[in-house]
Image (spheres, rainbow, N blue to C red):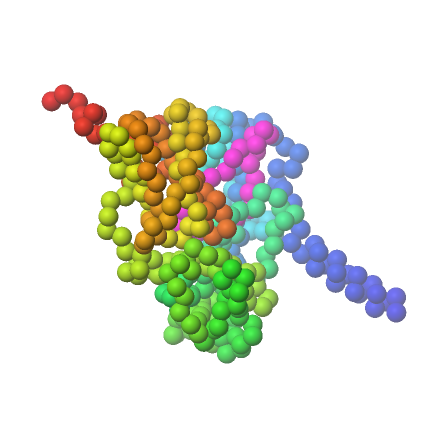
C-alpha cells in the first residue's frame, strides 16, 4: 500500500513540475549582464526544430530606431534563448522571431516588451502565439490549438501543436459562439496529402453564420487541447463586408467625420487629445456601427491639427491604434492628426 501511494505521489509531483521553468535573470539587474538594459528571450517550437530561427530586435520607446538581427546563444529545457544587452536605456523594445533572412515570421505582427526597473526583461515565447509569458511558473506546454481561422460562413481552418485523428473527431470537437454550441458537419484534414492524423484540420459547420456573428466570441475547443479564439480571415473578403467609401478623418470646416472599417469589433471609440504628448485622451466618444462593419462618429467644430486615436474591442481584448488612413501623425507615428491639407501646403 505504501509503495502504491509513493508511486501516485511521484506521478503527481512529476505532473506538477513537468513545466517548472526558471528565470535566467532571477535576482539580477542589467549591470550584472554588463548593460544598461537587457532582453532575455526564450523560444519554444513544438517540433523542436530551431534551425535558421533568429531574432530581429529594435529600440521602440521613447524613440524607435532601426533593428538588428540576433542569434539564440543559450539553451535550456524550454528551448533556445538569447541574452541581448544594450548600452543605452530604453523603455520598450520591439521584437520579431523570424526564419533566416525574413523567409518567414513566427507571428505576422510586431511585438513589444516593456523594460522593468531592474533593467532586465525576460520573456518566454511559444511558437505561433502572439502573447508571451513573463512569469515562467505560468508556462503551459500542453497540446493546443495554435491558430484557428474563419474563412467562410461555414468553414474553419485550424493549426494544432500536436496531431489529431480526424476519423475520431465526433464529440471531441466543439465550436461555440458566445458560449452556444454550433452544429458541426465534418472535421477533415485540410491538406489532402496528409494522413488522417494531422496538425492541419478543416471544420465544416452544419449551418451558415450570419455577417453580424463575426464580431461575437467564436471559440474552438478540442478534447485534450487548450481552446482558441477563432480569428476572421478570408471571410472578410466576402461582399457582405466590402466597403468602397472613404475612410479616415473626413475633414470639413465645421465638422469632421471619423470613419473606420472593423467588422470584427464589438465596440469602437474615438479618442481625442488636446496635447500631442498626452498619454490619456481628453475625450472618449463611442462610435456607431454602420453597414459593412464601418464605425463612424461626427464631431462638430474645426478640428484641423487635432490629435486622435481609435480604441477597439475584438476577440476579447481592447486595443488602441492610430488611424491607418491618417493624413498626418505626431512624432514616431504615436497619434493620428486631423489635417486640412489646403492649409498645410507650402507656398510654391
Give residue 2's position: percent from left, percent from top.
88, 66
Q: Residue 201: x percent and y percent?
A: 45, 69
Tell how many labels: 0
Taking the spot 28% from the left edge, 60% from the top edge, the residue there is: 239
Point out the image quarter for the N terminus: bottom right
- Nearest the viewer among 179 and 194 is 179
Question: In which quarter of the view is residue 60 placed?
Answer: top left
Compared to residue 102, the image places residue 202 above or below, namely below
At 50% from the left edge and 66% from the top edge, which residue is drawn?
175
**Horizontal side of residue 122 vs 238, given as left or right:** right
Using the rendered image of the protein, determine whether residue 50 is visible from the camera's viewpoint: no
- Pick out the residue farthest to the top: 347
Instruction: Check the image and name the residue furthest to the right.
Output: 1
Residue 32 highlighted magenta (yes or no): no
Q: Quadrant of the C terminus?
A: top left
Rendering coords of residue 156 (x, y %): 42, 66
Question: From what the image shows, is residue 74 above or below residue 45?
Answer: above
Q: What segment carries the magenta color?
A: 105-125
Which residue occupies the foreground of this view, 73 or 35?
Answer: 35
Q: Nearer the viewer, residue 32 or 270?
A: 270
Residue 120 placed where, x, y %? 57, 33
- Which residue lies most toward the bottom here? 167
Q: From the viewer's perspective, is residue 177 above or below residue 76?
A: below
**Membership of 114 in magenta stretch:** yes
Viewer can see residue 259: yes
Residue ID at (52%, 52%): 126
Amino acid at each position: 500500500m505504501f509503495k502504491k501511494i509513493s508511486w501516485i505521489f511521484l506521478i503527481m509531483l512529476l505532473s506538477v513540475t513537468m513545466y517548472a521553468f526558471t528565470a535566467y535573470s532571477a535576482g539580477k539587474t542589467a549591470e550584472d549582464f554588463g548593460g544598461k538594459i537587457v532582453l532575455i528571450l526564450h523560444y519554444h517550437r513544438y517540433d523542436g526544430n530551431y534551425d535558421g530561427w533568429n531574432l530581429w530586435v529594435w529600440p521602440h520607446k521613447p524613440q524607435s530606431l532601426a533593428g538588428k538581427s540576433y542569434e539564440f546563444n543559450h539553451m535550456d529545457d524550454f528551448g533556445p534563448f538569447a541574452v541581448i544587452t544594450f548600452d543605452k536605456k530604453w523603455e520598450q523594445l520591439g521584437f520579431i522571431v523570424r526564419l533566416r533572412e525574413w523567409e518567414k515570421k513566427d507571428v505576422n505582427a510586431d511585438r513589444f516588451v516593456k523594460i522593468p526597473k531592474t533593467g532586465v526583461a525576460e520573456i518566454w515565447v511559444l511558437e505561433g502565439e502572439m502573447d508571451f509569458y513573463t512569469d515562467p511558473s505560468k508556462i503551459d506546454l500542453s497540446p493546443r490549438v495554435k491558430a484557428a481561422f474563419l474563412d467562410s460562413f461555414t468553414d474553419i481552418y485550424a493549426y494544432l501543436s500536436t496531431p489529431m485523428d480526424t476519423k475520431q473527431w465526433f464529440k471531441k470537437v466543439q465550436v461555440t459562439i458566445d458560449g452556444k454550441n454550433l452544429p458541426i458537419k465534418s472535421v477533415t484534414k485540410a491538406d489532402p496529402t496528409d494522413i488522417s492524423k494531422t496538425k492541419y484540420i478543416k471544420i465544416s459547420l452544419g449551418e451558415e453564420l450570419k455577417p453580424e456573428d463575426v464580431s461575437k466570441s467564436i471559440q474552438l475547443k478540442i478534447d485534450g487541447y487548450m481552446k482558441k479564439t477563432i480569428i476572421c480571415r478570408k471571410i472578410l473578403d466576402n461582399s457582405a463586408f466590402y466597403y468602397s467609401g472613404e475612410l479616415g478623418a473626413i475633414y470639413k470646416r465645421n465638422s469632421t467625420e471619423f470613419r473606420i472599417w472593423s467588422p470584427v469589433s464589438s465596440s469602437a471609440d474615438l479618442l481625442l487629445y488636446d496635447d500631442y504628448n498626452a498619454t490619456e485622451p481628453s475625450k472618449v466618444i463611442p462610435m456607431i456601427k454602420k453597414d459593412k462593419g464601418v464605425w463612424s462618429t461626427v464631431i462638430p467644430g474645426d478640428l484641423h491639427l487635432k490629435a486622435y486615436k481609435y480604441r477597439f474591442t475584438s476577440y476579447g481584448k481592447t486595443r488602441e491604434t492610430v488611424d491607418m488612413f491618417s493624413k498626418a501623425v505626431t512624432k514616431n507615428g504615436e497619434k493620428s492628426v486631423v489635417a486640412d491639407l489646403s492649409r498645410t501646403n507650402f507656398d510654391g
